[in-house]
Structure formats: structure tokens, C-alpha cells
Amino acid sequence: MPIDFPGEEWTAAYQNAINTSAEYKEAGKDWTHGAIAFVVPKDPVVGLEEDTAFILELHQGECRKAWISTVDEAKQQPFCLTGSYSQWKAVMRKELDPIKGMMQGKLKLKGNLPIIVRFVKAAQVLVELTGSIDTKFLDE
Amino acid sequence: MRYDADLNFVYAHTPKVAFGVNVVADLGTYAGEMGLSKAVVITDSFLAEKTDLLDRVKQTLGPLLAGVFTGVIPDPTAASMDAGAVYAGEQGADSLISLGGGSAIDTAKGIAVVLKEGGKILDHEGYHALEGPQTPHIAIPTTAGTGSEMTMVTVIKDPERKQKTFIGSFHLHPNLAILDPTLLTGLPPKLTAATGMDAMSHAVECQISSLGQPVSDAYGIEAIRIITNYLPRCLEKPDDLLARGRMQIAANMAGTAFSNAMCSLNHAMAHTLGARHGVHHGTANAILLPHTMRYFMDVSAVEFARVAVAMGIDTSGMSAEEAGNKAADQMEQFVEAIGLTDRLGDYGVTEDALAGLADVAMTDGTIIYSPKPVFEPQDIVEILRKVL
């Protein structure tokens, strides 16, 4: 059954997808740079009434913890990516390359870019794994 | 085909540009029109003490001048930007005027952020993380190369991590660029050549970047044509205002192009060589460029064939690969002809250092826009070895 994005259940499914991916285990095995947070600003038009954020605590190819957080907590993480609901949807559907989206200002990155670049392969796998979750988008 | 029906891009055409002989004399008028009242000039001690350029700026600013920060250093560090922000804050600055090459302009961008947002510059690392307009900034380049007056990025050397990092945002564009050819006539030959080749590298790398689009292609190709024709002329006759002006325009166009399309592997290596061994950014780009072109020939021959035409090569009857290889060969000859014959060994780089340099280049923000993924550090080692 499709899972609403964003939400607790979706975040748990994402953690599970990461931790069962041999590809991510390999690509992210040297990641020791802390958590990555994702922020989705409220968008009443698509049915998202509040700013929403979730955090992945990633470490050496594993997602140790994943949880829905406040925006403030998200912004305190070493890396924080912010994008509108429609942009995240485009990323998850592979209609928007996240690197391209970042350069075009559609996704906003707070954090050290060289570290992200070093792990670009791991980042690609993380994005691809969102596609493995049976997701229900709010505007559909 | 490089572009398909799903082509999509965001193109920033900023800032306003004022070009012309002695147009720097209008700086005070422009600043007044922008409502600025306390401007701090950001420059380096050489320009301030050994040239008349700062005096010309002071004269036109008159009472709008609030202070002069002369702490700009080559390959600006976070510490130099933070120090400039402290100084500008003490003067009550409401605006910044950068006078110098890319280092001065990038330093001013960093100061603009700290003045507006507070904290230190590395607190603001990221892409498009700045949420609003920053401190107003007028850029007056005194070299024709970096194109930094047109870009949304500031490059920051981080001595602790021994690499360069970036802050990028549409809010980092200066608000006005003043291009006056008379500011360039005192530029020494080697710096003229190196900065000009920085612009050439921007223009060529835009042609193959994965973020490229037809607008940046057009700007880049015209910049290549101008640089090919006018950079040698600047070296032969340094006070040729026509040639100097054309080079300013070319660097500006290439800057606009790469601010949108981004650079790729060549700049990743040049940033690393600058951060680790102090190799001048333009020189590094110049000596590496022909080899980088050959490395990407298997995926970008069509684009390099266009570069060949822009360089004046008669490509009739040639395949794309033949024309592309001809462009790489001619680029190598061009670099030598303008006097950039440096080798990495001249800067103390040894064979043993190449693997470490490759590892750092693999983490440079520009590498991800390469026309094919560069996943193997050994590929970079082999390119670096060619200029060792």
C-alpha cells in the first residue's frame, strides 16, 4: 500500500531501503560526516499544511536512525537540503537531477560541498532508493 | 545530441555591466544612484600602494568612501574574509567596492555575506542557502580572466582542510560591474597571459559541462574567438586599449557562461594545485587544458570541433574527432606561444604527490559537471603527470 510522503512511516521505509541496499553499503562505507536533513516548506496547494523535515543519521554505509524533526533541528545538522514539495517529488521521480537542481537553486544545500562531492555516488544511490518506496504524494 | 527535448535550465544574466575607457570615473555617480553612502573598498596592498588605481576610485567616490581594506591575498582564505568583514563593520559600511582580480572580488563577496548574515564566512557554506540580498557590491576587475564580477560563487581557501571550498548563491552576484580597459594596461605580461587563459578555460569547459545549454555555449564560443585574437595582442602591446577592452569583454562573457554552466575537471585540478602548491590559478588551467580536452575527446569531440572553429582552425573535411584533436593541439601551442611554459615541478610538485592531488581534485565541487563521470583518481594522476 502506498505510503504518504512525507511522514513517519515513509521515513522508516526509507531507512529500511537504505539499510537493505548493498549498493549504498558500499558507496557510503566511508561516510563519517554526520546526519543529513531534508526540509520541505509548507505548501497548502498540495496539501502540506506545515513545514516538514526529516533527518537521516548516516554512518559508514548505514542509516542508524531516521526521524521526523522540526525545521530548527534539521538546520542544525551538518548538511541540510531544502526544496519545495514539487521539487522533491521531481527528484524522487528522477525528473530532476539533484545536483542540477542544487545548482539551479531549486534545492538549497547548507553544508560543506566538497564532502558531498566526494560522496556523489552515495548521494546518487540515496536518491535512487527513494524510488523503491511505494510513495503516495499528497497532490495525487 | 548534447541537448534533448527535456533540456531545462535557469540562466542568470546579472549584474549590470558598465564598459568603456575611463568609465571608472562614473563610479561615484553609479554608487549615488544605488543609494550607497558608506562604501568600503576591498583591494590588495600592491594595488593600493604601487599603482594609481585606488586613487582613481577614491577620487570618484568622494564623500561616499568610508574606508579601504587592503588585506586581500591571492587565493583568499576564510580568515582574510572574516578580517575584512570586521574592518568593514567597524567603518559602518553599507556597501563594498572590490578593486582587483578575482581574489579581491571573491573576498568582497565573502565580506558581503558576513556583514549581512553575521558569524564567520564558513558558517555560510553551501549552495543557495542564503535567503536574501546581501550587502551591495560593485566589482571593478583589474584583470581580464576570472569573470568573478559575473559569478554567483566565491571560492575560499581553507588552510585547515588544504582545499578550496565554495559558497554559491544568486544573492552573491555583485550588483554592478565596471569594466574599464585603462585599469589593465599596467598588468604584467605573465599575469595577463595567465588570467586570460583562466577565461579561456572557463569558455572551453562550458562547452562540455553537463550543465551547459545554448546560451552559455554562445557566450563561451565568442569568448574563445576573442581571446584567441586579442590575448596575444595584449602581450605585444600592453597599452592597446582596444585589445585590453576586448579581453575584459571576453572574460566577462566567459564568466557569465561558467556561472551558469559551471566548469569541470580542469578547474578541479587547478583549484587543487592552487590550494596545495600555490600554482597560479590561470597558469594551472592553461597548462592542463589541452590534456583535459584530449581526456574528454571520446565524449565531447563535437563540442571541441566547435572550439576549433572559434580558434580559427579550418576544419573542413575533418571528422569531429580530428577537429577536436586539432583544437587541443592548437591550444597547447597557444599556451606556449603566450609564455606559459611552467611545469608542476617548478612549484615543487613531485611524482609522489600526484595521487594525493588527485584525491583532493576528486572532491572539488566543479568535477561533478564533467561530461563523463570521473570516478578514478588514476585518470587525474595521468593528466597531472603530463605537465609534471
Image (cartoon, coloured by chain):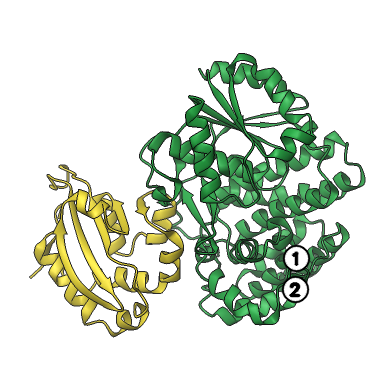
Number of labelled discs? Answer: 2
Q: Nearer the viewer, residue A83 or B300?
A: A83
Cα distance between the residues tagged 1 and 2: 7 Å
Chain coloured green in the rendered structure: B
Q: Is any part of residue A107 visible from this angle? A: yes
Chain coloured yellow in the rendered structure: A
Q: Callout 1 environment at 10 Å: few (<14), some (14 to 19), or many (20+)?
A: many
Q: Nearer the viewer, residue A33 or B252?
A: A33
Asked whether disc 1 touches disc 2, contact meaning CB atoms under 8 Å apart, the reply is: yes
Q: How far across and down, in percent of the image, does residue B67 sit? A: 59, 26
Q: Earlier in the sequence, mark 1 or mark 2?
A: 1
- Quadrant occupied by the C terminus of chain B: bottom right
Q: How far across and down, in percent of the image, does residue A80 sit? A: 30, 56
| A132, above or below B195, in the image | below
| B223, above or below B54, in the image | below
**Hey, what amino acid is under mark 1?**
Ile
**Hey, what amino acid is under mark 2?**
Val
- Residue that numbered label 1 is attached to: B287
Residue furthest right as drawn: B236
**Is disc 2 placed on a helix, strand or loop?**
loop
- Residue that numbered label 2 is attached to: B387
